[in-house]
Amino acid sequence: MNLRILLTFHGLITLAAGMVLIAAPGLIPSAVGVRVPADAYLVCYLLGAAELAVSFLSFAGRSLRQSDGARLVAQTMIVFHGCTAAVEAYAFTRGVHAAIWANVALRMAVIALFAHYGLRRKALS
């Protein structure tokens, strides 16, 4: 594996998440016991749009040849997933089902992958 392959997988997964959040807004939240009423779908749509933007950044980052650009993309993904893991942990304290911890763990693994493949100078040169 290298950063280019990681960004490809990440782009595909975030693209799928964004499309699902827009096409079936309640599906992903229901996986952790969160019911989203139809009049609150805008929140899912906005999150879906953010996922699509992150997907675009993943795909665009695959072609970066300069180490500073690739490093910035990796740092952005680390911040995105770190912030998301933090708010998911906070949501648990506010009553979201314990199943959310699986997603937090997944995000921590993604952070480790981006740190390993995206922040090492040798991997970027």
Image (spheres, rainbow, N blue to C red):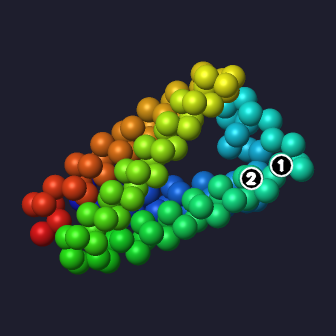
For the point 50% across and 63% down, the residue is: 54
Mark 2 residue type: Val
Percent position of residue 52, x then y? 58, 65
The number of callouts visible is 2
Q: Quadrant of residue 94?
A: top right
Pick the residue in front: 58 or 89: 89
For the point 43% across and 43% down, the residue is: 82
Element marked by disc 2: helix
Mark 1 residue type: Ala
Assess disc 1: are there few (<14), some (14-19) or many (≥20) residues with their C-alpha within 10 Å of its C-alpha: few
Residue 85 visible somewhere in the drawing:
yes
Residue behind mark 1: 40
Element marked by disc 1: helix
For the point 30% across and 43% down, the residue is: 112
Percent position of residue 118, x then y? 25, 57
The answer to whether residue 88 is left or right of residue 48 is left
Percent position of residue 50, x then y? 59, 61
Q: Residue furthest right?
A: 39
Residue behind mark 2: 43
For the point 41% across and 75% down, the residue is: 60
- Residue 66 is tagged as none
Give the quadrant of the N terminus.
bottom left
Measured in 3D between alpha carbons, the distance from the residue under mark 2 to the one under mark 1, in whole angstroms, is: 6 Å
Q: Quadrant of residue 27?
A: top right
Pointer 2 with pointer 1, Cβ within 8 A: yes
The answer to whether residue 13 is left or right of residue 72 is right
Residue 4 visible somewhere in the drawing:
no
Give the quadrant of the C terminus.
bottom left
Assess disc 2: are there few (<14), some (14-19) or many (≥20) residues with their C-alpha within 10 Å of its C-alpha: some
